[in-house]
Amino acid sequence: FLGSSGCGKTTLIRCVNRMVQPTSGMVLIDDEDVSDRPPIQLRRSIGYVLQDAGLLPHRTVGFNIGTVLRLNGVSKAEAEKRARDTAAQVGLTEEQLARYPHELSGGQQQRAGVARALASDPNILLMDEPCSALDPISTLAVEDLIHELKENFTIVIVTHNMQQAARVSDKTGFFSLEATGKPGHLVEFDDTTKIFENPSKKDTEDYISGRFG
């Protein structure tokens, strides 16, 4: 999802896990209305990656990754095993699991945030500006990880980085605020290639080309 600040991108993905309740319409996952599921149960079944990783600073990286598992009632031993497995999946070592978040680089912290989201074996990952605080090299490393993960997961990403959207996404939705400044709306949704090379709407073209936004 692309668009200027305040146009509703983050609000929309937070509707998916019911952190925000829609005022109208429905959010369906596998043809099931998410409003029919208990919010806490739903949230624990959907991976959510924050822009700053959101790790608990006083807990080890391994403990952070296993947090959702323990909340779901998984035993300590199983949580630790799955934390190691998902850490390896995102390129973190066992030695790094014993560290505290401040002892990792920004890119490594973000990988830990992704590992935490994966640990509960979701089929959907929500990523809200996952690379906004990272340097270009760390950003590319996270994007490489996204390419690997999207073979097995549905990933919904909010980003202001148009180049990143063009690199990692298969479909792109462009959101815009109304001219009056009222809450935003979806202007266009299509294959990423079409959005960037031949958008159907002038507002989309203006944003992609840098004429506004």
Image: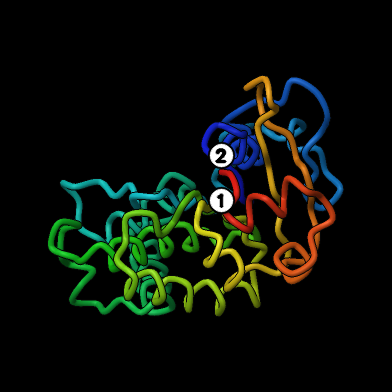
- Disc 2 or 1, which lies upstream in sequence? 2
Residue lying furthest front: 211
Q: Residue at x 20, y 57 (%)?
A: 101
Q: Is residue 19 toward the left or the right of residue 37 in the image? A: left
Relative to 213, say whether 19 is above or below: above
Disc 2, disc 1: CB below 8 Å? yes
Q: Residue at x 75, y 62 (%)?
A: 195
Q: Residue at x 68, y 42 (%)?
A: 175
Q: How many marks?
A: 2
Q: Which mark is residue 158?
A: 1
Of 67 and 201, which appears nearest the observer? 201
Of 198 and 87, which appears nearest the observer? 198
Label 2 – label 1 distance at C-alpha: 7 Å
Instruction: Sort mark 2 into few (<14), some (14-19) or many (20+) by Cα contacts within 10 Å.
Output: some
Q: Residue at x 38, y 54 (%)?
A: 132
Q: Is residue 80 toward the left or the right of residue 201 in the image? A: left
Task: State which quadrant residue 26 falls in.
Answer: top right
Percent position of residue 41, x then y: 60, 39
Q: Which mark is residue 17?
A: none
Amino acid of disc 1: Val
> What residue did someone put label 2 on?
10
Of 64 and 90, which appears nearest the observer? 90
Amino acid of disc 2: Thr
